[in-house]
Structures are given as C-alpha cells and as structure tokens.
Amino acid sequence: MKHAAKSGGEDGSAAVEFVFLGVLLLVPLVYLIVAVGQVQGAAYAVVGAADHAAKIYAAAPAGTAPESQARAAAELALSDFGFDPNGLELRISCSPECSAPGSTVTVTVALDVPLPVVGAMPGMNLAPVRVDSTSMQTVERFG
C-alpha cells in the first residue's frame, strides 16, 4: 500500500508535457517552412523576371522603347508569383551597344522580400531578404 501513495502525484502529466513540447517545437518549424517558402518563391520570381526582361529587350525592334517593355515584362513575371512589382529594381546594360547586332544585353532584377509575420510584431525590425538574378541575351545578328 505504501507504493500507491508515492506515485500518485504525477499521473497524467506525460500527456500535458507532450502537448506543450509539441506545440513549442512545432510553431517555429512551421514558421521556418513558411519563411523559406516565401524567399524561394521570390527567387523563382526574379529568375523569371530577369529572363523575360532580357529576352524582350534583346528582341525589341529598332526605334522602340525596349526599357519600358522590359520593365513591364519583369513586373508581370513578379506579379504572376504574387509579389508587388513596385519593389522591383531593374538594371540593364549592354556590350558593346544595345541595338548593335550580336551585342549582349545583361538584365539584373532585384527584389526585397519581407519575412512573414515579423513586420506585424512590435519591436521586430528585421531587414527583408534581398534576392536577385541576372540574365544575358544576345541581340540577333540578322534582325
């Protein structure tokens, strides 16, 4: 009879500990998965935006405004992935000359991706994650 009196204080506490530790470990894991997914989606978006902008710029006929067409293509690619195109940074360079046949057009697209939920928490001023991509296309030699 003495054994029953000693072990009665901890009956049922294993289930409480399991639930508490499960939630404590699961919440950061879910946040990590969501944050990495957001950054990876942005990485795919800037790769597509840079690629499309470079293709549009290199294929633009002479006498048009390829900068605005390339920017529109990059903005469309970002919005297709659900990102705000207003944060888009687009840099275009050419060597030797942009409209010369055989020249190379280089387009770099950069985007700052805010981490989910962190902006809504007071006192948490974490910098957004910057993702960028560069694409190169050759202007056709024979138009």
Image (cartoon, rainbow, N blue to C red):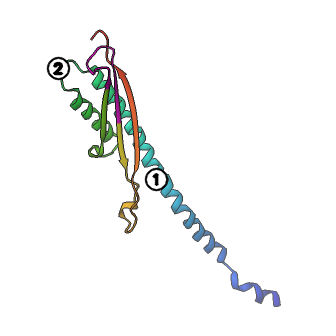
Task: Report which residue position mark 1 lands on.
Answer: 34
| Residue 40 position in % (x across, y down) | 45, 44
Q: Amino acid at mark 2?
A: Gly
Residue 117 lies in quadrant: bottom left
Please, is residue 35 above or below residue 17 in the view?
above
- Disc 1 secondary structure class: helix
Q: Quadrant of the N terminus?
A: bottom right
Task: Report which residue position mark 2 lands on.
Answer: 63
In terms of sequence position, does the residue under pointer 2 or pointer 1 come before the other? 1
Please, is residue 15 above or below residue 125 in the view?
below
Report the residue at 45% width, 53% height from top: 35
Q: Amino acid at mark 1?
A: Val
Q: Is residue 70 a member of the stretch shown in magenta?
A: no
Q: Which residues, given as a range, are shown in magenta?
A: 94-108
Cα–Cα gap, marks 2 and 1: 45 Å
* Residue 1 seen in this snapshot: no
